[in-house]
Image: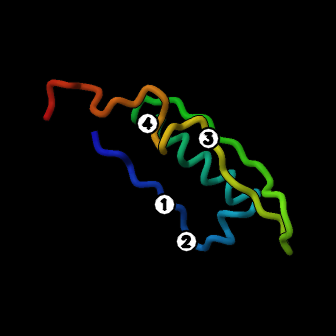
């Protein structure tokens, strides 16, 4: 099974760092992995520090960008 590409449009980093943009990206990632049979949880947290505008980061329960329990292909008979 190939790892699905996750891209949000537009590719403007400012869009993804807003609360709404980060939440949309999180839901997209959850839906894509759900289609492949994995449960992924995402949440948005504020970035603390000196910034001019509020920034948010997307967090998840994935390990190295992959869902917990991911072991490659579901059907090991396929190559």
Q: Nearer the viewer, residue 31 or 78?
A: 78
Residue position marked by numbered label 1 in the rendering: 7
Residue 60 drawn at (x, y percent): 61, 40
Residue position marked by numbered label 2 in the rendering: 11
Indicate whether 40 appears above or below 2. Answer: above
Residue under the image location 48 percent in, 34 percent down: 67
Asked if marks 2 and 1 touch (Cβ < 8 Å), the reply is yes
What's the distance in space between the residues labelled 1 and 4, CA to CA? 16 Å
N-terminal of the pair, mark 3 or mark 4, is: 4
Crowd tier of the residue under label 3, counting other residues whose Cα lies within 10 Å: few below 14, some 14–19, many 20 or above: some
Asked if marks 3 and 4 touch (Cβ < 8 Å), the reply is no
Please state which of the two labelled residues, at mark 3 or mark 1, is closer to the viewer. Answer: 3
N-terminal of the pair, mark 4 or mark 2, is: 2
What's the distance in space between the residues labelled 3 and 2, CA to CA? 20 Å
Residue under the image location 73 percent in, 48 percent down: 44
Please state which of the two labelled residues, at mark 4 or mark 2, is closer to the viewer. Answer: 2
State the count of labels.
4
Residue 10 drawn at (x, y percent): 56, 71
Q: Secondary structure at mark 4?
A: helix
Split into 4 quadrants, where in the image is the C terminus?
Answer: top left
Asked if marks 3 and 1 touch (Cβ < 8 Å), the reply is no
């Amino acid at each position: 099974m190939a790892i699905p590409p996750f891209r949000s449009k537009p590719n403007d980093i400012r869009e993804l760092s807003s609360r709404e943009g980060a939440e949309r990206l999180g839901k997209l990632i959850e839906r894509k992995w759900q289609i492949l049979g994995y449960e992924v949880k995402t949440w948005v947290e504020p970035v603390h520090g000196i910034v001019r505008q509020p920034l948010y980061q997307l967090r998840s329960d994935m390990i190295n960008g992959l869902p917990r329990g991911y072991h490659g292909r579901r059907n090991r008979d396929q190559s």
